[in-house]
């Protein structure tokens, strides 16, 4: 296990990394589905909190492996088995997501156990790196110790009364994201800019694809509950246009130019909101379908916000981490302004549909205003 060259040409994601992503999207899909049911049932506040908490566990476990794999060159049987253990952990985590959304007995037991299993596997990876790579030994040991300490605290988290759950969770979340900040000060790991941005891009594609799948499944299930198929066809069209526009906007800037040693933490951490918003988008579409079939008691304005808020968060997240540094003044005005208009959409006469129109308008601006030219890749 030795560091990879951050300037290595033609660096692409491995088949193991792609397999790893596919397993994680199962948890994303489960979390989005539970969010949909909670919001549609009128428990939006607790549902959103539960979703953000569960999504942190999913995202953080995925992100830690992704950056580690970008830094070290190894593909032997032990590395593969350790990675598969992490994959097993996220499958167990998916099974425990439902109880977290239970307002009466919000149970984190399965989620925490699965999460700790995934993190223990990363400790093994870092200890192996510390033993086999003297140049990054201090960094690897710092990662291993930091992760181990926080996992002990997560086990203690299960013993807390329900009233302390949320504040303690926030503290432990901050402790988790502080570990890389502290460890990297002892020596930066040599991540590959093209590879790391490709990994984030691929996961964005998977989450957007999951949104389309969830929406299509909901539309098919609603077919027997409505008299006319016209509204469902319209939902399908708006969903496709919106998802396609989100894809276009995300992939407009050259992400490898937007990430550097100084901005790597911001790039990685802000993606939590980008991924979570993309996953919540599908939940919003499903709530919209519930409104058409009479399966939700939410008012029309609240239904519209379930799609407009995730899209607005997605737009602002992508603008902050990638578009802003690669765009001219026109684009840097159009994208944030579009996000604001999307948030105002629910109070206008044609909610949801107007959101798709705004997204198409942003895409049109991006087509007319290509990214700024940078240094040769």
Image: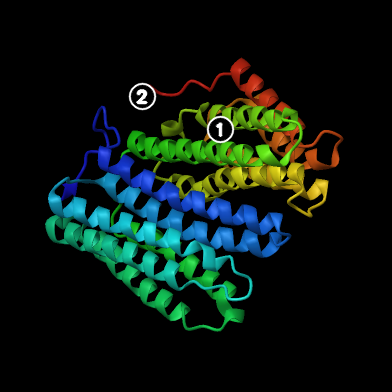
How dense is the environment of label 1, judged by Cα within 10 Å: few (below 14), some, or many (20 and up)?
many
Query: Which of 366/325 is in front?
Result: 366
Secondary structure category for the residue under label 1: helix
- Per the image, the residue denoted by label 1 is 323
Q: Is residue 54 above or below residue 304?
A: below
Q: Which mark is residue 377?
A: 2
Query: Which of 61/365 is in front?
Result: 61
Mark closer to the chain start, 1 or 2: 1
Q: Position of residue 226 (x, y in %)?
A: 74, 38
State which quadrant residue 343 falls in.
Answer: top right
Q: Position of residue 170 (x, y in %)?
A: 54, 68
State which quadrant residue 53 falls in.
Answer: bottom right
Query: Which of 174/377 is in front?
Result: 174
Q: Position of residue 57 (x, y in %)?
A: 45, 60
In the image as oriented, which residue stretches furthest toward the right?
349
Q: Which mark is residue 5?
A: none
User: Can residue 269 be seen in the rendering of this structure?
Assistant: no
């Amino acid at each position: 296990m030795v560091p990879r060259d951050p300037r290595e040409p033609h660096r692409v994601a491995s088949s193991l990394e792609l397999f790893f992503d596919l397993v994680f999207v199962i948890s994303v899909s489960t979390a989005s589905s539970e969010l949909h049911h909670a919001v549609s049932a009128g428990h939006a506040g607790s549902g959103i909190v539960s979703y953000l908490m569960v999504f942190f566990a999913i995202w953080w476990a995925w992100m830690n492996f992704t950056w580690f794999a970008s830094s070290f060159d190894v593909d032997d049987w032990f590395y593969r088995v350790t990675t598969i253990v992490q994959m097993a952990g996220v499958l167990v985590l998916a099974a425990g997501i439902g109880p977290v959304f239970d307002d009466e007995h919000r149970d984190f037991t399965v989620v925490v156990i699965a999460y700790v299993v995934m993190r223990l596997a990363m400790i093994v990876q870092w200890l192996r790196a510390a033993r086999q790579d003297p140049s990054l030994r201090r960094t690897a040991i710092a990662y291993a110790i930091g992760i181990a300490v926080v996992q002990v605290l997560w086990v203690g988290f299960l013993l807390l009364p329900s009233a302390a759950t949320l504040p303690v969770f926030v503290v432990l979340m901050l402790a988790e994201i502080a570990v890389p900040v502290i460890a990297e000060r002892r020596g930066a790991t040599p991540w590959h800019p093209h590879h790391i941005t490709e990994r984030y891009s691929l996961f964005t594609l998977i989450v957007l694809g999951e949104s389309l799948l969830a929406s299509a499944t909901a539309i098919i299930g609603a077919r027997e509950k409505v008299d006319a198929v016209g509204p469902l066809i319209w939902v399908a069209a708006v969903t496709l246009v919106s998802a396609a526009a989100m894809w276009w906007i995300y992939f407009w800037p050259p992400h490898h130019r937007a990430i550097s040693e100084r901005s790597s933490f911001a790039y990685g951490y802000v993606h939590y909101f980008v991924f979570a918003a993309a996953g919540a988008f599908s939940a919003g579409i499903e709530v919209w379908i519930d409104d058409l079939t009479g399966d939700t008691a939410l008012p029309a304005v609240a239904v519209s916000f379930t799609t407009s808020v995730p899209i607005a968060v997605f737009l602002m997240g992508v603008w902050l981490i990638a578009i802003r540094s690669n765009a001219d003044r026109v684009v840097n005005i159009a994208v944030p302004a579009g996000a604001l208009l999307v948030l105002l959409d629910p109070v206008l006469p044609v909610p949801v549909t107007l959101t798709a129109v705004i997204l198409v308008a942003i895409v049109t601006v991006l087509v007319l205003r290509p990214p700024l030219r940078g240094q040769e890749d």
